[in-house]
Amino acid sequence: MDKNFVFKSIGVIRSSHTKASETPIQPVFAEGIKGTVVLNPDYADGLQDLYQFSHICLFYYFHKAGPLELVVKPFLENREHGIFATRAPARPNPIGFSVVRLVSMDNNLLHISDVDILDGTPLLDIKPYIKRFDSRDNVRCGWQDRVKDEDAAIRGRREFKGS
């Protein structure tokens, strides 16, 4: 089995977030925060019909992530957990994803909202969010089930006060 993979950036994500410590930890905590995706013009034809979707999944490279940590203390809890039981960025393959609102499109420029991504983040892929495929009923969310919604709302925003 080939253990080496090569990914190339297909664009860049622009946002008002310049410090990881002030960036909301998930799009649900970044409601209304705007950003853009600047897709490499070579891939613009791949955007055909994307405007029909209200939300898109962005897959990106955590370009500012620290070194791999197999055990981390996530922002929503004061206990350590294995990296694979969290969404922390210090992963074996630092790949992130966010479900954001697609506001509008202008050629290879996507205007998005609910952005929890650092400015200048390299984009790896875009997929439409499809409720039929991506939403599940009767799920267990492990240690996250113990986190109160009020606590998550405060800690998840990291006290962000941006626009």
Image (cartoon, helix red, strand yellow):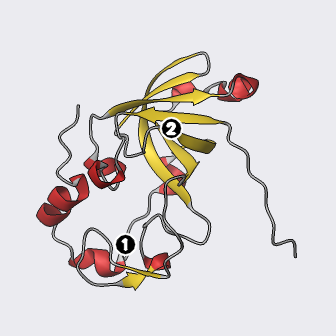
Please state which of residues 6 and 54 is positioned toward the viewer in this rendering.
6
Q: Is residue 26 left or right of residue 38?
A: left
The image quadrant that residue 122 belongs to is top right
Kind of residue at disc 1: Asn
Residue projecting furthest to the right: 1
Could you tell me which secondary element the residue under label 1 belongs to? Answer: loop
Q: CA distance from mark 2 to mark 1?
A: 37 Å
User: What kind of residue is marked 2?
Assistant: Gly
Q: Are marks 2 and 1 in contact (CB under 8 Å)?
A: no
The image quadrant that residue 11 belongs to is top right
Quadrant containing the N terminus is: bottom right
Q: Nearer the viewer, mark 2 or mark 1?
A: 2
Q: Is residue 22 above or below residue 56?
A: below
What residue is shown with label 1? 138
From the viewer's perspective, tell me whether residue 48 is left or right of residue 26: right
Residue 120's tag is: 2
Q: Going 68% across and 27% down the picture, which residue do you hit?
A: 40
Looking at the image, residue 59 sits to the left or right of residue 23; the answer is: right
- Which residue appears at 40% of the width and 31% of the height? 35
Q: Nearer the viewer, residue 28 or 35?
A: 35
Percent x, y of residue 5: 79, 61
